[in-house]
Amino acid sequence: MDTRTQLIWSRCPVGMTTQGSQCKGEAKLMKWVAAERYARQRGGGWRLPTLNELLGIVEKRCSNPSINQKIF
């Protein structure tokens, strides 16, 4: 959970599972429409993040990926 925005982020990409502190498996690639449908079908209020929400988790000290991998 992002304490600043109160958003709950999925720790691992779709297709991967959490094992200990790591994501294992293979991420499933989807087009935007399919990803929106997947989030709706998952239920529980899941949805795709907005561009601003994604930019809010960018870690400027990291690159490729630009997220803090200790958190995600």
Image (spheres, rainbow, N blue to C red):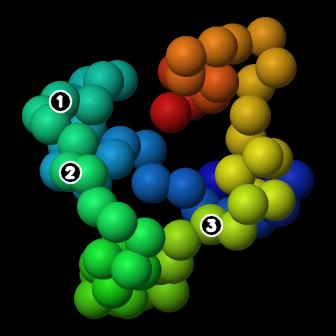
- Specify few, some or many for label 2: CA neighbours under 10 Å numbering under 14, 14-19, or 20 or more: few
Along the line of sight, which residue is nearer the eye, 4 or 41?
41
- Specify few, some or many for label 1: CA neighbours under 10 Å numbering under 14, 14-19, or 20 or more: some
Q: Pointers 3 and 1 in contact (CB under 8 A)?
A: no
Residue 13 is situated, as x and y percent measured from the top left of the image, at: 34, 47
Amino acid identity at mark 3: Pro
Of the numbered discs 2 and 3, the one sitting upstream in the chain is: 2
**In which quadrant of the rendered view does residue 60 lie?**
top right
Q: Is residue 18 left or right of residue 32?
A: left
Give the label, 3 or 1, closer to the camera.
3
Mark number, residue 28: 2
Of the numbered discs 3 and 1, the one sitting upstream in the chain is: 1
Along the line of sight, which residue is nearer the eye, 35 or 41?
35
- The answer, for residue 61, to whether it is visible in the render is yes
Residue that carries the numbered disc 3 in the rendered image: 49
Q: Is residue 17 left or right of residue 38?
A: left
- The answer, for residue 39, to whether it is visible in the render is no
- Residue drawn at x 73%, y 60% is 51
Residue that carries the numbered disc 1 in the rendered image: 24
Residue 57 is situated, as x and y percent measured from the top left of the image, at: 73, 41
Describe the element under mark 3 as helix, strand or loop.
Answer: loop
Whole-Å distance between the Cαs marked 1 and 2?
A: 12 Å
Mark number, residue 39: none
